[in-house]
Amino acid sequence: MSRTFVGWPAFPQAAAVATRDAQLRANVARATGTIRAKRAKLVAERPDWEELRDSAAALKDDVLTHLDTYLLQVEEKVTAAGGTVHWARDAAEANRIVTDLVRATGEREIVKVKSMLTEEIGLDNALAAAGIDARETDLAAAIVQLGDDLPSHVVVPALHRNRAEIRDIFVREMGRHGRPAPEGLSDDPPQLAEAARLHMREKFLKAKVAVSGANFLVAETGTAVVVESEGNGRMCLTLADTLITLVGLEKVVPTWRDLEVFLQLLARNATGERMAPYTTTWTGTTPGDGPQTFHLVLVDNGRTRALADEVGRQALRCIRCGACMNICPVYERTGGQSYGSVYPGPIGAILNPLLKGLDDPQTASLPYASSLCGACNDVCPVRIRFTDVLLELRHQVAEGDAKVKHPGEKAALRAVGAVMEHPAAWNAAIRAAGKAGPLIPKKKLPKPLSGWTDSRIVPGIPKESFRAWWERTDGGTE
Amino acid sequence: MSSARDDILARVRAANATQRAEPGAVPRTYLRHAPGIDPADRAAVLALFAERLVEYGATVHRVRSADVAAVLAAALPEGSAVVPGGFPAPWLAEWTGAVIADTPPLPAGRLDTVDAVVTTCAAAIADSGTLVLDGGPGQGRRAATLLPDLHLCVVQADQVVSSIPEAIGALNPRRPLTWISGPSATADIEMIRVQGVHGPRRLTVVLVEG
Amino acid sequence: MRTALFVTCLNDGLFPRSGQATVKLLRRLGVEVEFPPAQSCCGQMHWNTGYRAETARLAAHFVKVFGEYDAVVVPSASCGGMPGEAYERAAETVGDAGLARAVRELAPRVHELTGFLTDVLDVEDVGAYFPHRVTYHPTCHSLRAAPVGARPYRLLRAVAGIEFIELPAQEECCGFGGTFSVKNPAVSGAMNADKARHVLETGASVLAAVDNSCLMNIGGRLAKDGHTVRTMHLAEILARTRADGPVLDLPHSTRELTR
């Protein structure tokens, strides 16, 4: 069994630990800084970038509005093309379907293309419990799996690891799962990539069953799309006899032509490339080419819950480009694991609560894991208004049905609000503050405000407020 | 007990039934052609295609049709190459290496021992330096273009369009498509681009003009 | 034009000099503002923490206090943005259609200070004199939520004697985020540390912004670390003239010395 995020601490506690890890901070800052620069350069190449974003957002909204129709269309087209479509209400059901499908083939080791959905539902562990070893083949996903680590980014899951750490993981672990790392492996990235190539090649050639996700699923044609860089995706999608693809309901796009919008946005925004090296599209099965058995598993696992949220449903437009985490100043200081989910950063801060609800303290802490700076809004290719959704989710915690409440905070803010509404009370409060100013400790505030003075002093409160000055000088004219 | 399918569809409909806002029409005001280029200017389109391929680490030869055989002879390794059915035989007339046919389909382990694969393509896109293979004549099945370490693709100039929107309508989604934009690569280690991971580590494009 | 000053609760109690500078500056430009004493807080702290019922009450209070004015000037991008960004939704949340209508009508008349100067008064050179080395932090609200664009830079560059230095990584948040700084002090502190470091890299003696909340955050860090960089609301720079002379305890800008 590999590690999971089950029982993870709430964001402030996890982040407090992460921000003290200088190595982690350096690794994350270097990686996000590099991607940000590449993305900015490539986005600047497109004079129609804003128009592409408009189209993408509108297309995804159309998908969400008519999702039932599109899903039925997918089912019809995939079935007609020789595939089998399965529906899964939740993670357990999806895992059971895939486990049964793999069991039926008799295979004990399968290969996987990186898929956030299978991370979300914990498929690898579910298969392991059934005695099936699912090997991740994407370099970053393999680094995470071999290191018994957890992902920290949706595009580059091992972004928190540097080359020396990766070398150590390869040398220590590869031999336990197949071909060992070459003798004298250095931490030079090309050498590390070569080690991965050799280790994985053996698995690709043997594998009879592959599991993948998909970036897009075209309703009009039933076509699935996988965008990748290394070729591990092509290996899995092409060489296995049986292909099992798991897709979240929201991955649908209406027509084949609509891919022209998303294919122009995705790689540019995700990795700063015009196109990722490899895009594979397939529809059901093709005699004589690739897997002859194809299963498509459509997974809900909270997506319909998110869909019902009038403000939050826009999070389902997400195409997992990761740009929101690359630009996020919070993510840059904490890394992805602090969010306690395979979806970190701004999208994680909204998507996890929307998928899971706000009833546990860890998930309920996520909408507050943002300074609301809004940088994510500006880079999102599908125009998700992250700050709107964060504020809506905070409202649901503060005043909605969520079980997690902050009664002390609510009482305090209500009391402050009551004073602010009444001019005489507010006037008196401002004057009292000026008098109390000298009594307030500048270097150590009491809880719950003590975090402020961990790294800052409190400004002195002037003896004379603005209103007192205005009154005394008649608006500065005396 | 209701099926997962029925439950999910019911949940979707229930969620959408409560929504007040109906989304507007999808705007389509983005460019149909590569930015900064007149799609009718063929020389510019081909120059962009070559430039983008090189930028992403592919080797490009721009040749006249009479010279294809000579260029292939020089560009292919001495060893062996998979040659899919329908690949024009005259183009390999000067190459002395071993032609490996994929009929009947070779096992993956055998394909893994071949040095190269030569193909044509279904379409090419200048803006992103992309080749699209659809398994048609001269292109072979997907496994054959994946396991050899060198992929050499012959592109006819009239197959090159400027942009993805120009290309997509002519492609048949019912066929399995492979869109290739430069050789296999990764940036998973410290965001440093390493060329060549699992797919062919070298990509050579022979662009035939006139 | 009847113009009101909404000074904001933070400026009222903690940064009265910013409010005073705003009054002095506007008076110099021929605008006599009124200060309705019943004003208090825009409700941003409540709104950003999720308390919409409280926000709606404060929105109603805001409408009561400012509804009759032709213009409301606010020396804060974040507080000045509240009527436009939040009040209508807060009113809808509590089902108060009348309030929603009232805030929709009032919001376009609420102006952040630099926008009021450049767009309503149509000035860039406000006749200011500030012979010191200054850097400027574009606060997130002024950058993205209620964008003021290049206005503060245009105003600053027109100040006589000023030596303006661009702040590295200026578009990155300082980590304040209202209750974020209390709920997530570790991350907030880490963001702020980087912002303070960038401020020091400029060698400026003054850090300016259009939001005292962010300046309080960054200034609190600089002061805790023993640095003498001063934080000043942009209004305090724009309000000073040659008659005021240089700020006595600030180093002169090098540009001024070489003149």
Image (cartoon, rainbow, N blue to C red):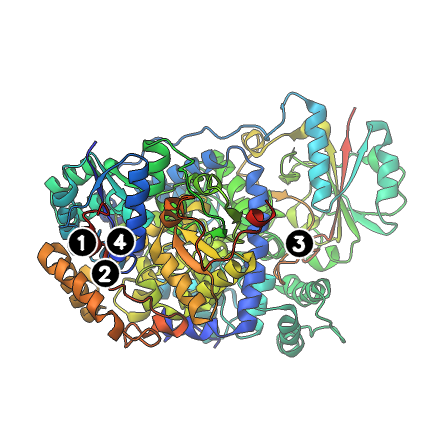
Mark in the foreground, 1 or 4: 1
Residue A369 seen by the camera: yes
- For badge 3, the amino acid type reads Ala
Q: Residues within 10 Å of mark 3 (few under 14, many from 20)?
A: many
In the image, B138 versus A369, the foreground residue is A369
**Quarter of the view holding residue A53:** top left
Mark in the foreground, 4 or 2: 2
Residue B185 - label: 3
Give the residue at mark 2.
Answer: A464
Sequence-wise, which precedes: disc 2 or disc 1?
A: 2
Q: Residues within 10 Å of mark 1 (few under 14, many from 20)?
A: few
Mark in the foreground, 3 or 2: 2
The local secondary structure at tag 4 comes to helix
Asked whether the residues under marks 4 and 2 belong to the same chain, the reply is yes
Q: CA distance from mark 1 to mark 4?
A: 43 Å
The local secondary structure at tag 2 comes to loop
Whether tag 1 and tag 3 are in contact, CB under 8 A, the answer is no
Sequence-wise, which precedes: disc 1 or disc 4?
A: 4
Give the residue at mark 4.
Answer: A392
Give the residue at mark 1.
Answer: A472
**Quarter of the view holding residue A67:** top left
The answer to whether residue A15 is above or below residue A56 is below
